[in-house]
Image (tube, grey):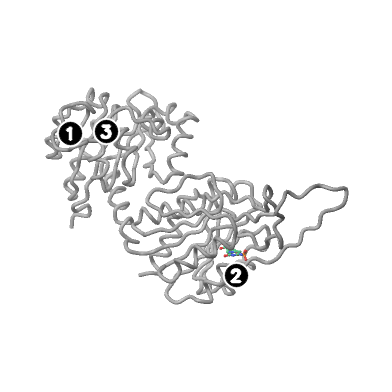
Amino acid sequence: MDSLNGKKIVLGVTGGIAAYKAVEIASRLRKAGAEVHVVMTREATEFVTELTFREITGQPVTVDMWAKVTNFNVEHIALANLADIMLIAPATANIIAKTAAGIADDMLTTTVLATKAPLILAPAMNTNMYENPVTQKNIAELKSRGVQIIEPASGHLACGVEGKGRLPDPAEIVRFVMDFAAGEQRLTGKKIIVTAAGTIEPLDPVRFLGNRSTGKMGYAIAAEAAKQGAEVLLVSGPSSLPDPAGVRTIRIQTALEMQAAVQEAYAAADAVIMSAAVADYRPKTVAKEKIKKSDDELVLHLERNPDILYGLGQHKNRQILVGFAAETCNVEEYAKKKLVKKNLDFIVANDVSASDAGFAVDNNRVQIYTRDGGCEKYPLMSKQELAGIILNKIAELMS
Ligand code: C5P
């Protein structure tokens, strides 16, 4: 069966020597059942002609923003809206940098900026360009926004050197798109609540108690769940991260506000993933005016915040509940206790005292403890990858 049946794929082709491989990619996508619309940069037309793609795809090919419009009213918006998936292969260092920076100065970059469709990039370039810290920074930035990156292959490059930067075989790229599309549908129709970042608890009009959570893990989960077709509500404490595409994001400040937002959506939810670092305590009173310093010690009285997840566990019917346990010692013991006490389906535990994983970094190293007593230990991986693993487990439990 065609696994891309009826999917509308906008294929961006940029000006690298690997542009010729995009012809086979377009052909394979079409054979897999996709409707393929090619957008080329001006430079790409130096390597392959528009005519080739038009013949292969059976669709008009777009290059010029100002050419006479054939099929679409406002072409860049029309293509951006029409796309179910946008794939750029090969993606040069230039298009990667422009996409990371939000530059829209030709048809392709304008379509990228205007689309809400998931974006997949297949970088292909000279090894030094690929390894240049600025390219790596751009790729990391795109990943953090939920863009899928198909790792380039290593081997003999057209520029004569050996190294990383080759566009993988067209068959592999199309397989990636198919897997992505299959995964994308897995959570269609499911309602998922994700919490992220830390709550902050005000002390007076200018001060608060907070914690080091940045929200990276929760935002990655929310973006991934949306990509897999779920209807996602992200309830986030203060975070500098942008709202993930396709996700309804509510920004709150305190644990009580987070609890209210989560509870309101809970009855209709299929799963709740509590990755937020909720403050366990809040100041008992919030001073109306800024607290003045004096020569004495200052004693703060704190009262307990509700344990949001515990409360959800008490009223659980069909919802899948996932908790996080950020520990600095005895990870296993504490995580297992929380799993039971909070009535969770599984808990993702990590040792936040490690400097390369946990708070405020892009990677995490976790163990997942399940209800049936199982424990899976995972190596250091990106938060995006971990988000995929967590959602796989949820999809399995749902089926
Ligand atoms: O008990 P502990 O705070 O370590 O448990 C962590 C898990 O419980 C996380 O999933 C966190 O989001 C959630 N939690 C909560 N409400 C709190 C504290 C933590 O929902 N007040």
Dot 2 or dot 3, earlier in sequence: 3
Q: Which residue is mark 1?
A: 61
Q: Quadrant of residue 58?
A: top left
The amino acid beneath tag 1 is Val
Q: Quadrant of residue 114?
A: top left
- The residue nearer to you, when weighing 334 against 264, is 264
Q: Which residue is mark 3?
A: 13
Disc 2 versus disc 3: distance between alpha carbons?
A: 50 Å
Can you say whether 379 is above or below 259 in the image? Answer: above
- Mark 3 C-beta closer than 8 Å to ligand 1: no
- The residue nearer to you, when weighing 372 against 201, is 201
Which residue occupies 32% across, 51% down? 180
Tell me if label 2 and label 3 are in contact, CB under 8 Å: no
Q: Which residue is mark 2?
A: 338
Residue 322 percent across, percent down from the top left? 50, 65
Direction from residue 24 to residue 244 in the image, left or right: right
Q: Can you say which quadrant of the picture contains the N terminus?
A: bottom left
Of circles 1 and 3, the one toward us is: 1
Dot 1 or dot 3, earlier in sequence: 3
The amino acid beneath tag 3 is Val
Q: For the residue labelled by badge 1, is the local secondary structure a helix, a strand or a loop?
A: loop
Can you say whether 111 is above or below 35 in the image? Answer: above
The amino acid beneath tag 2 is Lys
Disc 1 versus disc 3: distance between alpha carbons?
A: 11 Å
Identify the disc placed on residue 233. none
Q: For the residue labelled by badge 2, is the local secondary structure a helix, a strand or a loop?
A: helix
Which residue occupies 40% across, 56% down? 225
Q: For the residue labelled by badge 3, is the local secondary structure a helix, a strand or a loop?
A: strand
Direction from residue 237 to residue 385 in the image, left or right: left
